Image (tube, grey):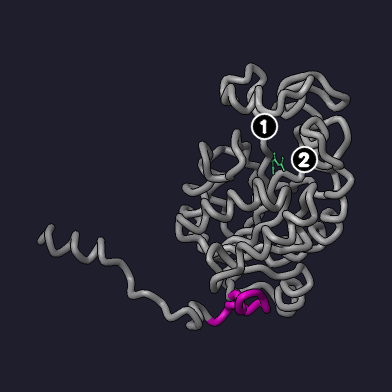
Amino acid sequence: MDLIAYNVVDIAGPEPRNRHQKETPSMISVPAEPYEFDLDPATTALIVIDMQRDFLQPGGFGEMLGNDVSLLGRVVAPLRRVLDGARATGMLVIHTREGHRPDLADCPPAKLTRGRSATTIGSPGPKGRILIRGEEGHDIVPELAPIEGEVVLDKPGKGAFYATDLELLLRNRSITRLIVTGVTTEVCVHTTVREANDRGFECLVLGDCCGSYFPEFHEVGLKMIAAQGGIFGWVATSQQLLSVLTEGPATPETAARLAAPDPVTADLGA
Ligand code: TIU
């Protein structure tokens, strides 16, 4: 085999696509800022970031940081509708949870001490130890609980790619686009979108399915994503997505994937 020629072809990769060119006939076009976001449910994942009691309910990490956690509650209803819509198409759903091992071995000392709060990560709270895996406060709120076949990804940092196997999991499933939701807009959502963008994933952020303790940060955070021609990604509402996502039946590609054994959970012996 001519190894040199082979390597040149491998490195060059496929021809770049025109940005308006549809990859497959099953792609749908979501009205968005700064322009429409094209997706195929078979190659798109819905990411739900950190919808945990620790951020949404009193006595958890969010409140420990001095925040009014009631501000995040408005995200739950629209996010539930998007979750239902994504599930109906067979789209891959990934839930993330920020948190740490019980012995805090994966928690940077700076994260433990920052804020100079009376309590810290690992301190006892009404829903168990704050931001610790396995505790009630660390888990996802019941309205958005994962169902069988969905991925639950524990992460020690703000970004969902840092120190996790998220990128491997997405590439194994040929996922190229992400619909990003969750909390908080300017912290874990932003960090994850930036990480994804640098890795070549195209992100659609659903504004009403994200929330912040600071309404002004939420507004500006969304603007920052879609500004400059979509410097980090696209922004739409849940209604804009659902109006096109639930229009037709599942695509042939998605139907085939649903019928096949799930390679990710099969590999894990689940
Ligand atoms: N504090 C804050 O706004 N957020 C976080 O600490 N983590 C997430 O955003 N998930």
Mark 1 surroundings: few (<14), some (14-19) or many (≥20) residues within 10 A: many
Classify 122 as above or below 235: above
For badge 1, the amino acid type reads Gly
The picture quadrant where one finds residue 29 is bottom right
Classify 106 as above or below 184: above
- Taking depth in this image into account, of 167 and 36 the one nearest to the observer is 36
Residue 206 visible, this orientation: yes
Mark 1 vs ligand 1: CB under 8 Å?
Answer: no
| Residue at screen point 78% across, 39% down | 55
Classify 66 as above or below 238: above
Q: Main secondary structure of the magenta part?
A: loop
For badge 2, the amino acid type reads Gln
- Taking depth in this image into account, of 218 and 157 the one nearest to the observer is 218
Mark 1 and mark 2: span between their CA atoms?
A: 10 Å
Instruction: Specify which label sits upstream in the sequence, 1 or 2.
Output: 2
Q: Give ligand 1's quarter of the image.
A: top right
| Residue at screen point 63% across, 16% down | 103
Mark 2 vs ligand 1: CB under 8 Å?
Answer: yes
Q: Position of residue 214 (x, y in %)?
A: 78, 50
Q: Is residue 27 magenta?
A: yes
| Chain part drawn in magenta | 25-37
The picture quadrant where one finds residue 1 is bottom left
Question: Tag on residue 52?
Answer: 2
The reply to whether callout 1 and callout 2 are in contact (CB within 8 Å) is yes
Q: Quadrant of the C terminus?
A: top right
Q: Is residue 106 magenta?
A: no
